[in-house]
Amino acid sequence: MSNESPTTQPPKIYKNPGIATVLSFFFMGLGQIYNGQISKGILFIILYVISLALIFVIVGFITTPILWIWGMVDANNSAKEINKKIAAGIE
């Protein structure tokens, strides 16, 4: 009989796509950070700040809403992909 205890793995934590989307709605990049994609979240924040600055030269009125919507869609889709990987045992 072996004294080895079975290895226990931490529970898999699924990401809620709705929460990721709402976080990105209120603060650009926060949904990506919630999903564990820190670098991507920081990149979204930097791009959003640049886009906001471009409002002063009119271009930002086009880029800011596009970037904001893209951030929400990306956060939602990323959470769903993470959940698929967890369910498949990849992560």
Image (cartoon, rainbow, N blue to C red):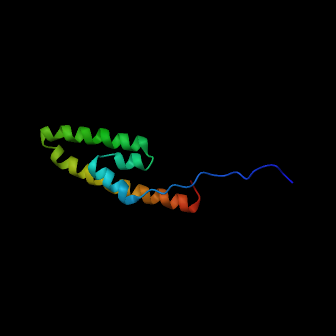
Q: Observer-nearest residue: 77 or 26?
A: 26
Can residue 71 be seen in the rendering of this structure? no
Q: Observer-nearest residue: 31 or 11?
A: 11
Give the image location of residue 30, x and y in percent.
Answer: 35, 46
Residue located at (66% from left, 52% from top): 8
Q: Which residue is most to the right? A: 1
Residue located at (55% from left, 55% from top): 12
- State the count of labels: 0
Give the image location of residue 89, x and y in percent.
Answer: 59, 59
Give the image location of residue 18, x and y in percent.
Answer: 36, 59
Q: Is residue 63 left or right of residue 17?
A: left
Looking at the rendering, which quadrant does residue 42 occupy?
Answer: top left
Residue located at (54% from left, 58% from top): 86
Q: Observer-nearest residue: 13 or 74?
A: 13
Can residue 81 be seen in the rendering of this structure? yes
Residue located at (48% from left, 56% from top): 82
Q: Is residue 5 left or right of residue 22?
A: right
Q: Is residue 73 above or below residue 64?
A: below
Q: Is residue 50 left or right of residue 16?
A: left
Give the image location of residue 51, x and y in percent.
Answer: 22, 41
Quarter of the image that includes the N terminus: bottom right
Q: Observer-nearest residue: 51 or 42?
A: 42
